[in-house]
Amino acid sequence: MNPSLQRRLLVSSGLLLLLLGLAILTWQASWRSGLQQLQDESLQQLRQFTGHLESQLARYQFLPRLIARNQLLVETLLDPDNSSRIDLANRFLEDINAITGASDTYLMDASGLTLAASNWNGERPFVGRNFSFRPYFQQAMQGKLGRYFALGSTSGQRGYYFAWPIIHAAEPIGAVVVKMDLAGIEQRYSGHEAQFIVTDPDGVVFISTRPQWLFRSLQPLPEAVLSRIANTRRYPGRQIEPLPLDWLPHQGDEPTLLRMGPRPPASEYLYQQQEMPKAGWRVAILSPLDPVRRNSLVATGLALLSALIALLLLLLLRQRHRRRLERQRYAERAQRELEHQVALQTTDLRHEIEERKRTEQRLRDTQGELIQTAKLAVLGQMSASISHELNNPLAAIRSYADNARQFLQRGQTEPVRQNLERIGELTERMGKISSQLKQFARKSSDRIEAVRVEPVIQTAIDLVMPQYRQSAIRIRNHCERPGPLALAEIIPLEQVLINLINNAVQAVDGDGEIDIHCETQQEWVLIHVDDNGPGLDARAQEHIFDPFYTTKKAGLGLGLSISARIMDSMNGHLSAANRPEGGARFTISLPAASDHD
């Protein structure tokens, strides 16, 4: 066999054995830990259950002694043929039973015959029945507290009986019995994951949170015990059969485990018990082992997964180390070759860098010229209306000059002064239009500074308004003075605003409203150009800023593309969306500036 392959097989076998040993150790440790935790938790629950059971018994065990002191009951026992006294005793016991919450309360004479009972008016009253066979009656007639658990021979209901003798002339003449119902204890603990059982001295389950375990024994009972149980009528009508359980082997201080039910499936439990010596009961808790087994499986799986991850990391580190050594060898070889190639290519690289710088400079010049050309194109669009805007004042100036000359010849100086003032106003208006056009046509200074956006918005509106003065277009500036400060270039920003306003005018088709708003959001100044036109379709929203994309019949599709690049050059951006109320919204976003910038 190849030595390398043999070595790999040995390493693989060793790793498998290591993982198997890790799984076994993890399972054992997790199982012991989980079993110990379950044992502690179950023992605490068992103590709580036992304490609750003892408190319920203690609640009723003193009632017969108190009731036995009642003189009415003594008189009833002394004169059992007095029907009126029997009726009073029945009603008295009925009231006592209602107040204490007991299952039944009744009065028995010395022979065990029930003379009065709280259920005297029920479907199956105890009155007239003889319970002298019950151990609790026998204990009471011996002058002791009688206590006993059994199924009622009349009601068929489980109950715990407390009895106390009624003494007259130093002799017991009867007994008072109080029966308590134990079903409420089962109901209170039935929602627990663990199961509780209470067994009598013979090992018969008479209280259980699992009803199918009732009146069954923990182990097979001898015939003599079964005969004795039947003779005492403790569980009348019940066939006592053993539960289908197997006690699992254990040693020393190991916890007691059992398997309940047929196999398969069978449920395994942790069994713990506690004695109640006064009642002669044994209380036990059966805690399912499935959660411990699941936790152990999870812990074992996690341990194996962690080991596999650690192993993979070691293999990865080993592989990386080997590759690093190989790369070092290759790097040394490549370094020698590279030094030779660098010497050859340094000259070519220098020429390439210089050519790239020249190309970038030409690109910047071309972009500037393209922006300037776009501005001149806008000027061309506005030329007709601006020419009309200038011709009207010129005609008016000539008219006012002719009128002033005539008034001057007549010696009327006041009309002359008024005409000259109007000429001055028209001249000032023409100068303002001319200065705005010269400023707009000027090349950008490439200088970003803090700019009040409201005057820039108003200048852009003033530049485009002359060509739309005769239409029904309404362009409104809602930006309050002085407006927010933004970092921008004034002339390119005016160009972008003019382009957006012209596009909005074309969108509303000569009759509509264009509203311009400005706001500050955290570190940004936003300028919104809104129209009430048809808005943008899905394709237009996706490609609106692409070069040569246009929705106009006659258009190059460069205006919005150039505008977006202008905003990028000012560290801002341009976006488009539809307004909820209809129409489109183009938003200019610029970095905000403070008054101290």
Image (tube, grey):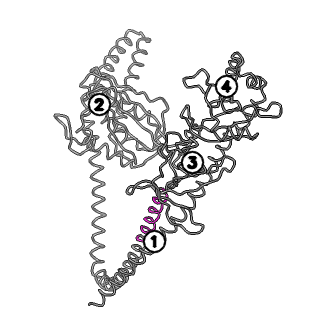
Q: At label 2, which amino acid type do we have? A: Ala
Image depth: mark 2 or mark 4 in front: 4
Q: Which residue is mark 4?
A: 115
Between disc 2 and disc 1, whose residue precedes?
1
Give the answer, above or below, for where 178 lies relative to 40.
Answer: above
Q: CA distance from mark 2 to mark 3?
A: 106 Å
Nearer to us in this view, 576 or 124:
124
Q: Residue furthest left?
A: 553
Check contact, mark 4 vs mark 3: CB within 8 A: no
Q: Which residue is mark 2?
A: 504
Q: Is residue 136 left or right of residue 190?
A: right
Q: CA distance from mark 2 to mark 1?
A: 78 Å
Q: Secondary structure at mark 2?
A: helix
Q: At label 1, which amino acid type do we have? A: Ile
Q: At label 3, which amino acid type do we have? A: Arg
Q: Is residue 383 left or right of residue 234?
A: left
Residue 523 image position (x, y, % from top left): 48, 43
Check contact, mark 2 vs mark 3: CB within 8 A: no
Q: At label 4, which amino acid type do we have? A: Leu
Q: Which residue is mark 3?
A: 228
